[in-house]
Image (cartoon, rainbow, N blue to C red):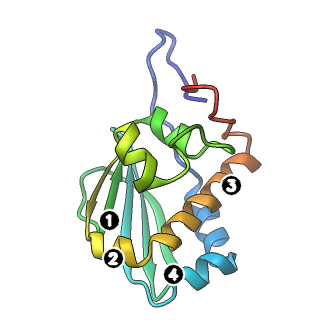
Amino acid sequence: MIPLTQHGEETSMPLVDPTRLQASANADPEFRMAARYWNATLSLESPSRALRVEIVDGQVASCRESETGRPATIIVVASDVGWAQFLATVPGPFYQDLLGGCVQHHGFQVNGDMLSLSAYYQATQRLFAVMRALRASTGEARAGAGGEER
């Protein structure tokens, strides 16, 4: 659910706890297999914040919150509502897949080294699955099939 201010405006929300994401991704055998040999920096951005994930030789070497607009190998930008839908326990229609649904149907933007993204797309999809599981374990994720979360 997107937190609202007392005036009903959306506030920025963290995607996931960076420390838990780093530990969980590095402990996930599917992510490790899909990410082997990968060296990249991912910046997952909302309008006001970013989660920066640095991958070195297939391991998440660093994961931290950052400011938006910094250079990265792959940059994914979406609204807070879009991220909440994408990272829901059960994503709604066309929120299940970054390129196949979110970019084409929900206004997500993906920039950077598209060859690297293509080569390691399964690793990014698994990283997002780990993020969904972490959000579900903390109660942050809700089923996204019923429209936008508020």
Residue occupying image coordinates x 64% and y 52%: 132
Frontmost of labels 2 and 3 is 2
Which one is in front, 105 or 37?
105
Quadrant of the image for the N terminus? top right
Query: Is residue 139 found left or right of 43 in the rendered image?
Result: right
Q: Secondary structure at mark 2?
A: helix
Q: Secondary structure at mark 4?
A: helix
Query: Identity of the amino acid at label 3?
Result: Leu
Picture coordinates of residue 46, whole percent (x, y):
38, 42
Name the residue tied to disc 4.
35
Who comes first in sequence, dot 1 or dot 2?
1
Residue occupying image coordinates x 47% and y 61%: 64
Picture coordinates of residue 42, whole percent (x, y):
38, 65
Who comes first in sequence, dot 2 or dot 3?
2
Name the residue tied to disc 1.
74
The residue carrying pointer 1 sits among few (fewer than 14), some (14 to 19) or many (20 or more) residues within 10 Å by Cα, namely some
Q: How far, Cα to Cα, is label 1 from label 4?
A: 14 Å
Mark 1 touching mark 2, by CB under 8 A? yes
Name the residue tied to disc 2.
116
Residue 83 can be seen, yes or no: yes
Which one is in front, 11 or 25?
25
Query: Identity of the amino acid at label 1?
Result: Ile
Q: How many marks?
A: 4
Q: How far, Cα to Cα, is label 2 from label 3?
A: 25 Å
